[in-house]
Amino acid sequence: QVQLVESGGGLVQAGGSLRLSCAASGRSFSSYRIGWFRQAPGKEREFVGGIERDGGSTFLADSVKGRFTISRDNAKNTVYLQMNMLKPEDTAVYYCAARRLGLVVPNPSDYDNWGQGTQVTVSS
């Protein structure tokens, strides 16, 4: 089992940047694929992107490609979501999630462990 804690959310103007962190505790963090998701009020949880165990492969939803990047530092048990050129429609609670088996996938139900989320608000 791995426990996840997100941080780095906040209020930012459109066009600005934020970097979210997902810090993990527990054993074998490098064994987990990590996905980033977001959920806006009244909407379903949406896949933002994910990163493979060694950080060699990352995946991003079309809505954030060219603006967001994902990286990880297994020595620090942390995954990062760098968000640039933020838009009001990026406003949501952002979650990271861990998956031990299989590949990075966009379905939230395929992830085993979740953080509590961090709020990102982008003003126009």
Image (spheres, helix red, strand yellow):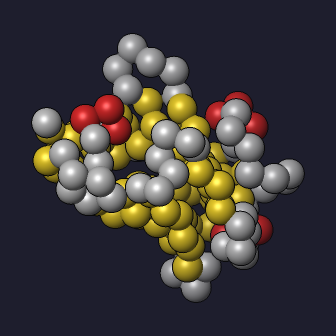
Which residue is at the front of the view, 16 or 120? 16
- Seen at 14% across and 47% down, the residue is 13
In the picture, the quarter occupied by the N terminus is bottom right
Q: Position of residue 20 (x, y in %)?
A: 37, 59
Residue 110: x and y, percent?
A: 75, 37
Q: In the image shown, does 105 or 124 lie closer to the viewer?
A: 124
Q: Is residue 119 above or below residue 27?
A: above
The answer to which image quadrant residue 2 occupies is bottom right
Q: Can residue 20 be seen in this snapshot?
A: no
Left or right: residue 79 versus residue 9 is right
- Residue occupying the far right of the picture: 102
Q: Residue at x 34, y 63 (%)?
A: 19
Q: Residue furthest front?
A: 66
Q: Quadrant of the C terminus?
A: top left
- At horizontal 56% and vertical 73% (from top left) the residue drawn is 72
Could you tell me residue 10's position as x and y percent?
21, 50
Residue 30 screen position, x and y as percent: 70, 73
Find the residue positioned furthest to the bottom: 75
Front position in the image: 11 or 75: 11
Q: Quadrant of the rendered structure where residue 56 is? A: bottom right
Is residue 88 visible from the viewing direction of this image? yes
Give the quarter of the image for residue 112: top right
Query: In the displayed structure, would residue 93 be above or below residue 24?
Result: above
Q: Residue at x 47, y 56 (%)?
A: 66
